[in-house]
Image (cartoon, rainbow, N blue to C red):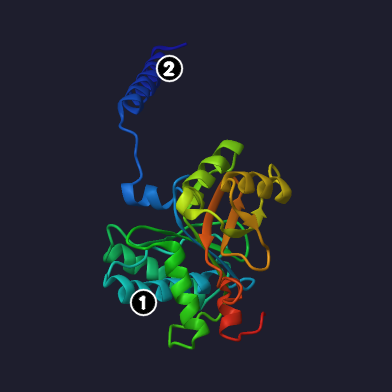
Amino acid sequence: MDAQSKKRKAGSDGRDAASTKKAKGKKQWSMPRKEAADSRGIQPGDVGIWATCAMKKEAKSVAELRDLFQDYASQLYGTTHGTGAARDDNADEQGADIEAEIQKELDDIRTPDADPLFTSVRLDTQCLLFFKTRPPVEPVSFAEKICQDAADDVEQKRCRFVKRITPIEATAKATERGLDDVAQSVLAPHFHGPERAGKKFAIRTSIRNNKEFTRDAVIKKVAAAVGPGHKVDLGGYDLLILVEIYKNICGMSVVGSNFDKLKRFNLAELHGVDDE
């Protein structure tokens, strides 16, 4: 090998070594805190509201619910804190829908809400949405107020594509232990203690994208967590326990006896909108 070749090789090796050293010493790029929080999806401990919607109308439904929720937050809590950027993986609608969502996200970036009351979460399941909430929003009373107003024909922002909304008071990992923890947390204020004895209750479950749990097993475990002194009454319950399991997350809430009268919190039915 001639001297010039050796020199080129040495130079190349030197640059590689220097580049490796620089790469090792270079600080790792990290996602900004707010973006990292928004991208984490549904996590154990989150509370919020599930919603179902018409096929391929996820993006529009996120926008509709965002406006509806903000309107009710202003009414109930007198707050101007809005919603986080819409985060729906199923937004496959074309043209104006996508452009509108992009514009909304740009607006959120320009005028960020450091601590929004509602943040929609990206999901990879069609016709399904989730909004995380924070205090002062209490998911059950908040959802019930929206549905009661719809039943009473109180003027409100209409959601053309949203169907059922389901409040969630607590979540945990979808494991036996997680379900137990959520049940104890959510059920205790309604069923535990002598002053709460004698309640009639029912349990309704929804299991999506999860093969670890069966409906019967979930109902049996939740009924055991209710404890003694109460009676199952599917048609005349005082309290209804809603259990939602989605992938590796389980959630639960307790709603009142008006749930069926309010069309199971189905806004489309309350507004007299036919399913599409």
Quarter of image, res 113: bottom left
Q: Between 228 and 49, which is closer to the camera in this rendering?
A: 228
Mark 1, residues whose alpha carbon is within 10 Å: few (<14), some, or many (≥20)?
some
Q: Viewed as shown, does residue 207 lie left or right of 144?
A: right
**Residue drawn at the location 59% of the way across and 54% of the way down:** 243
For disc 2, the marked residue is 5
**Whether residue 74 can be seen here:** yes
**Residue drawn at the location 29% of the way across and 70% of the way down:** 77
* Above or below: residue 99 compared with residue 251: below
**Residue 72 rendering spot, x and y as whole percentages:** 37, 75
**Residue drawn at the location 60% of the way across and 39% of the way down:** 175
For disc 1, the marked residue is 71
Amino acid identity at mark 2: Ser
**Residue 146 rendering spot, x and y as whole percentages:** 46, 76
Q: Number of numbered discs present?
A: 2
Quarter of image, res 264: bottom right
